[in-house]
Image: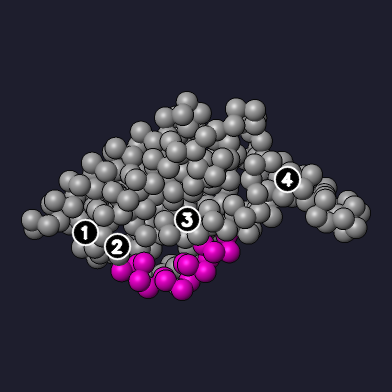
Amino acid sequence: MTFLEAILLGILQGLTEFLPVSSSGHLVLAQQFLGLKEPLVFFDVMLHVGTLAAVLVAYRDAIRQLVVGGLSTLGNSQLWKHPRTTLSTASELKFIWLILLGSIPTGVIAVVFKTQLESFFEEVLIVSVMLILTGAILQLPRFCRKDTEIPDDSVRQLKAWHAPLIGIAQGCAITPGISRSGTTISLALFLGIPAKTAAEYSFLLSIPAILGAVALKIRDLEDPTIAIHIVGGGMLAAFIVGYIALRFLLVVLNRGKFSLFSYYCIGLGLISLFIALIQ
């Protein structure tokens, strides 16, 4: 892999990580197009680290509020006397708890099915089908009746049983071609969670998921086949473009146009499926 190819893949990762079109699916197709036949799973994970940095920067105020509010609630004696009541009223600590709860099924899926999921990075046919499936998933919010009386930034609609469901969806999105942001946000919207809360929960839920993926691949840090400056260049490109794409997605989501990305996913999936079948 050349430095220019790494930059191009980083730009592609940044564009597609937050837009609901599957970054890993695009990377598989791009690597095939560039002639990179070996599955560069570690490089793909490091590009996700670049977009993780974009999440941390974009949601720095929300993360700071969660940390400060969560710590102050932990110091409240009422938490230990009446934990259920306190958790229901302390939004910051509740949000942190739901992130941890949603991360459990994601981690289990990643560990148990790690080998099988990584093998899909070589299968363009599977990626194509998963892109079509992503397009169908993005249509889910259209079948949900939104309660206009609930503020768009309300955390009240995010229930404890929502977290493992969204966590399972995120775990399934490890499969290349399934959009992580598209799947988790679409499911959250379908469950009646307001758009702003759905996006915030989805992106903050990605933090432990990405950190876990890096931990699983930490042994590849000594891999001499990919130079450090190539990995670094790809990560920087993913961070810059990812931050811009995340901001753009929030605008699209607030305007209720989220499901429009489904047509792109279905179209790309059908084209790549056709090419894969005739080769």
> Dot 2 corresponds to which residue?
121
For the residues marked 2 and 4, what is the alpha-carbon distance in whole angstroms?
37 Å
Comes first in the chain, label 3 or label 1 = 1
Residue 148: name its quadrant: top right
> Dot 1 corresponds to which residue?
125
Q: Amino acid at mark 3?
A: Ala
The answer to whether residue 211 is left or right of residue 137 is: right
Which of label 2 and label 1 is nearer to you? 1
208 or 135: which is nearer to us?
135
Q: Amino acid at mark 4?
A: Glu
Comes first in the chain, label 3 or label 2 = 2
For the residues marked 3 and 4, what is the alpha-carbon distance in whole angstroms?
23 Å
* Chief SS of the magenta region: helix
The secondary element bearing badge 2 is classed as: helix
Quadrant location of the C terminus? bottom left
Residues at circles 3 and 4 in contact by the CB criterion of under 8 Å: no
Comes first in the chain, label 2 or label 4 = 4
Q: Where does residue 195 sit, x and y in percent of width and height?
A: 54, 35
